[in-house]
């Protein structure tokens, strides 16, 4: 029966296992009595680095002992590759790593590992999908790190449900959490995604783990972005940039050089901005194409920017600046495959659209930072000093920022080594097409 007789919803029934208390006792080495909050002693949080700088960054500085980490992403984007490289680095430092592969045989993993240059006697490959056998090997080997590839392939023989079902994923994830916390072993789990891009399985899986890492980017492209969606031991929203090569994923230490092409100003429909992701700032290029159409319903296509936000900005440009888009298709794309979600990208998006609509390139070496309000006003953004410093480091000479942010700067613009152009309204920004600052 797939439909619940109480609420009438489909696929909401979950099997519950009935066992005696002795066999259902969880694996735990935690304190079994309440502790006064003032009596709790905080020790030094040890983080083991895996010698992959971008991965250590998104993990909050390294791998935390006893943590449960979930890695998700589209098929073929590099989830298994990055974890296999991480396992190799840690095994090379004499750490015993147990790599449980449920989707590949040991020979298949060996072939891929040789291409990536992976090896070592301390890297143990265990092709198994039964949870109870995996748990026995973890108890017997007591490794320093466990990798499960993937959670959808692992199943418990004590639950009568197919692998990948809600009850199986919930039970397996709970067992792995008890192993991680009880034995103080970090466990990395690879998770599949649905066609909508969300991690497959119950939402409880993301709530249960300590850290959720998600791969972004096009599998046909060379660059991958690993984003921290959740992290109990570090900042969320942090990203790491990788490039897929023949020998695996190679970290990109200077993302700004990847996401921009020159200093702009060569062609119309292009604007450059500085965005903040986690603790780092980098420069990205926003491209736009405005094309006249004879159809009654013009298209609105956005890659890397929220489509609803684009619709709002187009309405503001029509109402407050007099630019008409009712008979034009508008396409927006953030170069490099990165997704920009912060409102500070509004001004760059508006300028890119206006540049394409007017067929006029923007001034060379200029960056645009600011949030656009419904009245067309340019609103202040956070961490403006960090954004300006990144622009100066990449060779840009002029930064267009909200007028309010100029008053809040700690250092005068002259000492910053870069020219600041304050704007109050989008009409002020449009004047830059004629001024050619």
Image: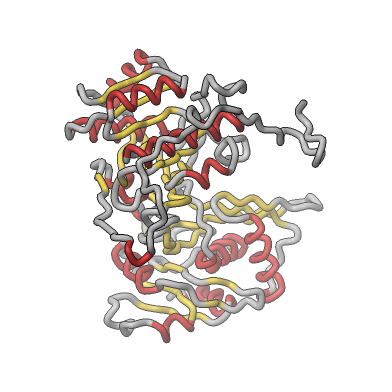
Q: Position of residue 150 (x, y in %)?
A: 46, 28
| Side of 327 relative to 154 (left or right) | right
Q: Quadrant of the C terminus?
A: bottom left
Corner quadrant of residue 126: top left
Q: Position of residue 391 (x, y in %)?
A: 35, 66
Q: Quadrant of the N terminus?
A: top right
Regarding residue 180, the answer to whether it shows in the image is yes
Q: Position of residue 230 (x, y in %)?
A: 46, 51
Q: Nearer the viewer, residue 260 or 126?
A: 126
In percent of the image, x 59 and y 65: which residue is there? 354
In percent of the image, x 62 and y 76: which residue is there? 376
| Side of 315 relative to 170 (left or right) | right
* Above-or-below relation of 308 to 368: above
In percent of the image, x 50 and y 52: which residue is there? 339
Q: Nearer the viewer, residue 14 or 335?
A: 14
* Above-or-below relation of 199 to 260: above
Report the label total. 0
Regarding residue 245, the answer to whether it shows in the image is no
Q: Position of residue 436 (x, y in %)?
A: 45, 74
| Side of 121 relative to 226 (left or right) | left
* Above-or-below relation of 24 to 184: above
| Side of 181 relative to 24 (left or right) | left
* Above-or-below relation of 108 to 96: above
Corner quadrant of residue 388: bottom left
Looking at the picture, the colour scheme in use is: secondary structure
């Amino acid at each position: 029966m797939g439909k619940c007789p109480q609420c009438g919803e489909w696929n909401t029934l979950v099997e519950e296992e009935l066992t005696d208390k002795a066999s259902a006792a969880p694996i735990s080495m935690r304190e079994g009595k309440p502790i006064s909050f003032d009596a709790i002693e905080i020790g030094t949080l040890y983080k083991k680095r895996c010698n992959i700088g971008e991965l250590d960054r998104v993990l909050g500085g390294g791998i935390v002992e006893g943590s449960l980490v979930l890695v998700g992403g589209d098929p073929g984007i590099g989830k298994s590759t990055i974890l296999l490289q991480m396992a190799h680095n840690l095994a090379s430092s004499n750490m015993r790593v147990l790599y449980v592969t449920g989707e590949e045989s040991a020979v298949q993993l060996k072939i891929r590992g040789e291409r990536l240059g992976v090896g070592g006697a301390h890297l143990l490959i265990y092709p198994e999908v039964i949870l109870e056998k995996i748990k026995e090997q973890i108890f017997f080997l007591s490794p320093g790190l466990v990798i499960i590839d993937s959670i959808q392939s692992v199943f418990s023989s004590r639950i009568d449900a197919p692998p990948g079902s809600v009850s199986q994923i919930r039970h397996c994830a709970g067992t792995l959490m008890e192993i991680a916390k009880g034995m103080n072993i970090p466990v990395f789990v690879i998770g599949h995604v649905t066609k909508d891009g969300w991690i497959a399985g119950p939402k409880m899986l993301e709530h249960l783990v300590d850290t959720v890492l998600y791969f972004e980017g096009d599998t046909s492209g060379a660059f991958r972005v690993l984003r921290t969606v959740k992290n109990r031991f570090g900042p969320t929203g942090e990203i790491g940039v990788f490039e897929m090569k023949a020998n695996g994923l190679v970290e990109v230490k200077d993302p700004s050089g990847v996401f921009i092409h020159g200093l702009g100003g060569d062609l119309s429909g292009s604007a450059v901005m500085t965005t903040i992701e986690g603790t780092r700032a980098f420069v990205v290029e926003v491209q736009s194409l405005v094309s006249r159409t004879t159809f009654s319903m013009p298209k609105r296509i956005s890659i890397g920017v929220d489509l609803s936000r684009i619709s709002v900005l187009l309405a503001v440009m029509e109402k407050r600046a007099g630019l008409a888009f009712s008979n034009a298709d508008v396409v927006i794309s953030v170069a490099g495959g990165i997704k920009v979600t912060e409102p500070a990208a509004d001004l760059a998006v508006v300028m890119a659209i206006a540049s394409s609509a007017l067929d006029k390139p923007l001034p060379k070496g200029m960056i645009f930072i600011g949030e656009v309000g419904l009245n067309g006003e340019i609103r202040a953004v956070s961490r403006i000093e960090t954004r300006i410093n990144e622009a100066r480091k990449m060779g840009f000479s002029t930064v267009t920022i909200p007028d309010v942010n100029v008053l809040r700067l700690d250092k005068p613009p002259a000492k910053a080594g870069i020219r600041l152009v304050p704007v109050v309204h989008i009409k002020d920004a449009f004047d830059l097409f004629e001024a050619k600052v």
